[in-house]
Image (cartoon, rainbow, N blue to C red):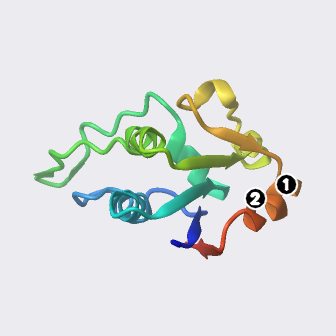
Amino acid sequence: MPKRILQVVENAFRATLEEQDDTVVWLTHAMRGAGGELGVLLRGNAVNTAVRGQDASGLAFGDRVQRHRTDLADDIAKLLGKGVRVSVVAEDLAERGLGAEDLIAGLELIPRNALPDLFEKFDQVWHW
């Protein structure tokens, strides 16, 4: 029986210049595709990952123009489409001036004090 793994993502926007955009989200896609039972918890600055309508086009470093448009919210939406449970810490969202209306659809908002209950539903918790 496969282990249920919760990926806790606290730092936002890792490796957004690479093909896989956010490495943890990419890894979760790959593991789910291989049959893994996974969940994702966005907390801290990572709650920004799920904000809809972000536009990273026009990013350039000197003469180097980034042609691969990063769309992390779409990557999260695709996880939801694969049946991955994606939760967001409500207080972390509010501390950044964001609300549920700013997020893509299908996310689970949970209060900080419910984290132990969430962790209990998984065999392993990986914190990034």
Q: Is residue 107 above or below residue 5?
A: above
Residue at the spot 33% in from the left edge and 64% down from the top edge = 34
Q: Residues within 10 Å of mark 2 (few under 14, many from 20)?
A: some
Residue at the spot 24% in from the left edge and 42% down from the top edge = 69
Secondary structure beneath dot 1 equals helix
Quadrant of the rendered image containing residue 20:
bottom left
Q: Nearer the viewer, residue 99 or 124?
A: 124
CA distance for labels 1 and 2: 6 Å
Query: The C terminus lies in which quarter of the figure?
Result: bottom right
Q: Nearer the viewer, residue 92 or 127?
A: 127
Quadrant of the rendered image containing residue 120:
bottom right
Q: Nearer the viewer, residue 59 or 28?
A: 28
Secondary structure beneath dot 2 equals helix
Residue 81 on image: x %, y %: 43, 38
Q: Which residue occupies the extreme top position in the image?
A: 101
The reply, left or right, for residue 55 in relation to residue 69 is right
The reply, left or right, for residue 61 in relation to residue 110 is left
Residues marked 1 and 2 touching at CB (< 8 Å) = yes
Q: Which residue occupies the extreme left position in the image?
A: 63
The reply, left or right, for residue 44 in relation to residue 39 is right
Q: Which mark is residue 118?
A: 2
Q: Which residue is mark 1?
A: 114
The reply, left or right, for residue 36 in relation to residue 110 is left
Residue 95 on image: x %, y %: 76, 45
Residue 32 on image: x %, y %: 40, 59
Q: Which residue occupies the extreme front position in the image?
A: 1
Residue at the spot 22% in from the left edge and 57% down from the top edge = 19
**Type of amino acid under label 1:** Ala
**Type of amino acid under label 2:** Leu
